[in-house]
């Protein structure tokens, strides 16, 4: 290693997207390695609206491993962090930068302490898969820092050990997590199905549902389902394998009706196995159910699906519209049923790609007030609107995989001190 007196800091910054499963992962066959009981498929969301940025650094001057998440220092002691770090260090390679006087040999990496600073561009409390983007970004940035030569598929098997769903965030577009057969998990990896340009008509609207309740974490929820649900085995053995084949075909052919039918059915079945768990787990709430009913009624009235819905381990709805027109019509319906609280302005109520709002012909709260009831409910207009049940909407689309941010100004750690900027 270069002279210890030279207090150099070497750092890398990366940005990684989050993802939402359209065929769900629920249940592990190995808790430590995080191996799933079925394959799953997800769509990667545009990092412009939902992503994690992580800066990782090493220096002979660092006294201990440290991590900051959203500006607060957190512990790196957890087994999942340690597993990811160890797996990356084991694959590290020699690194040399003569100009800066940095020389790190393969075996030196494990003796150097790391500083990690990670930031989500969306509220962590919103319950939107932040661990997926977080672990994917940690593994991707550490791999680049330590000169690991493996491709994103191999890196996905490491991110998987941080959080199962994280492995699917190593790619853009639509991604399959192949459960694999090997006991060591070496074949349990993510594979890209199609990139984000393949089906770029799709628009995604996330309804962040106001909730006071603390939900059961995915990790403990799925553990309880594996132990107590009789339905889960049927789902993993009989239902999902067929759906995976059909879903891959639907994505390849941009067949929206099949895609929507499979996405909604799989979300509903995932919540059915949660209900079949003892004691039952309820992730969706009344607002989630109202969103489902609104989508179902409209799809039925149109004669063919315009929007698919899917819900993870929480009440938030992820709505995938077949194109911009359907997204604008969906947003009109959502704003009709779920207008913002009087203290909320439209600009903070619909965030992300605001052009969808423009397409919907909505410029201000007066336009929201003036929205007519959707034709499919005109005989049964609800007496009361569900004001305030939704915190905000995020409009987004399918997005790209991880990228390095080479510009020093985008780093979260200071190059002189190695501490958060
Ligand atoms: C409902 O990946 O968060 O979002 O592997 O225990 O960290 P761990 O669980 P996690 O579970 C995600 C479950 C899900 C479905 C999915 O993303 O496929």
Image (spheres, rainbow, N blue to C red):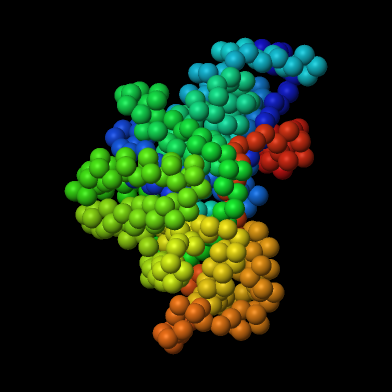
134 left or right of 366?
left
Q: Position of residue 383 (x, y in %)?
A: 44, 87
The quadrant of the picture occupied by the C terminus is top right
Q: Specify the quadrant of the image occupied by residue 282.
A: bottom left
Residue 332 against residue 10 in the figure, above or below: below
Q: Residue furthest right?
A: 99
Q: Is residue 235 visible?
A: yes
Q: Residue at x 55, y 42 (%)?
A: 173
Q: Residue at x 66, y 12 (%)?
A: 1
* Residue closest to the eye, 3 or 142: 142
Q: Position of residue 257 (x, y in %)?
A: 44, 56
Q: Specify the quadrant of the image occupied by residue 332.
A: bottom right
Q: Residue at x 27, y 53 (%)?
A: 273
Q: Specify the quadrant of the image occupied by residue 143.
A: top right
* Residue closest to the eye, 163 or 301: 301
* Residue closest to the eye, 418 or 349: 349
Q: Position of residue 364 (x, y in %)?
A: 68, 77
Q: Residue at x 41, y 69 (%)?
A: 300
Q: Is residue 77 visible?
A: no
């Amino acid at each position: 290693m270069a002279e210890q007196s030279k207090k150099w800091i070497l750092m890398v910054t990366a940005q990684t997207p989050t993802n939402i499963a359209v065929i769900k992962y629920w249940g592990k066959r190995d808790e430590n390695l995080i191996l799933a009981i079925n394959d799953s498929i997800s769509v990667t969301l545009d990092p412009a609206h939902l992503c994690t940025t992580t800066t990782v650094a090493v220096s002979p001057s660092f006294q201990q491993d440290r991590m900051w998440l959203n500006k607060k220092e957190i512990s790196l002691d957890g087994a999942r962090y340690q597993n990811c770090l160890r797996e990356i260090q084991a694959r590290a390679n020699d690194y040399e930068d003569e100009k800066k006087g940095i020389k790190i040999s393969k075996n030196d990496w494990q003796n150097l302490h790391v500083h990690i600073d990670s930031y989500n561009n969306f509220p962590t409390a919103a319950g939107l898969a932040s661990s997926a983007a977080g672990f994917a970004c940690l593994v991707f940035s550490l791999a680049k820092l330590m000169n690991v030569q493996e491709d994103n598929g191999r890196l996905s098997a490491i991110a998987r050990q941080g959080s199962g769903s994280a492995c699917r965030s190593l790619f853009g577009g639509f991604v399959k997590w192949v459960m694999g057969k090997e006991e060591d998990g070496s074949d349990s990896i993510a594979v890209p199905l199609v990139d984000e340009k393949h089906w770029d008509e799709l628009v995604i609207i996330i309804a962040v549902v106001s909730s006071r309740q603390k939900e059961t974490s995915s990790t403990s929820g799925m553990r309880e389902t594996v132990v107590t649900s009789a339905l889960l085995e049927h789902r993993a053995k009989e239902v999902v394998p067929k759906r995976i084949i059909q879903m891959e075909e639907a994505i390849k052919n941009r067949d929206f009706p099949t895609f929507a039918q499979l996405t909604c059915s799989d979300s509903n079945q995932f919540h059915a196995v949660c209900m079949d768990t003892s004691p039952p787990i309820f992730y969706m709430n009344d607002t989630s159910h109202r969103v489902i009913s609104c989508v179902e009624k409209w799809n039925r009235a149109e004669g063919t699906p315009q929007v698919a819905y899917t819900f993870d381990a929480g009440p938030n709805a992820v709505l995938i519209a077949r194109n911009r027109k359907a997204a604008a019509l969906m947003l009109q319906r959502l704003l009709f049923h779920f207008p913002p609280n009087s203290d909320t302005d439209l600009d903070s109520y619909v965030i992300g790609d605001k052009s969808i709002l423009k397409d919907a012909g909505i410029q201000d709260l007066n336009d929201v007030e003036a929205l007519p009831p959707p034709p499919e409910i005109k005989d049964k207009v609800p007496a009361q609107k569900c004001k305030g049940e939704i915190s905000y909407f995020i409009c987004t689309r399918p997005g790209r995989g991880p990228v390095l941010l080479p510009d020093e100004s985008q780093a979260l750690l200071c190059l002189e001190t190695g501490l958060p900027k």
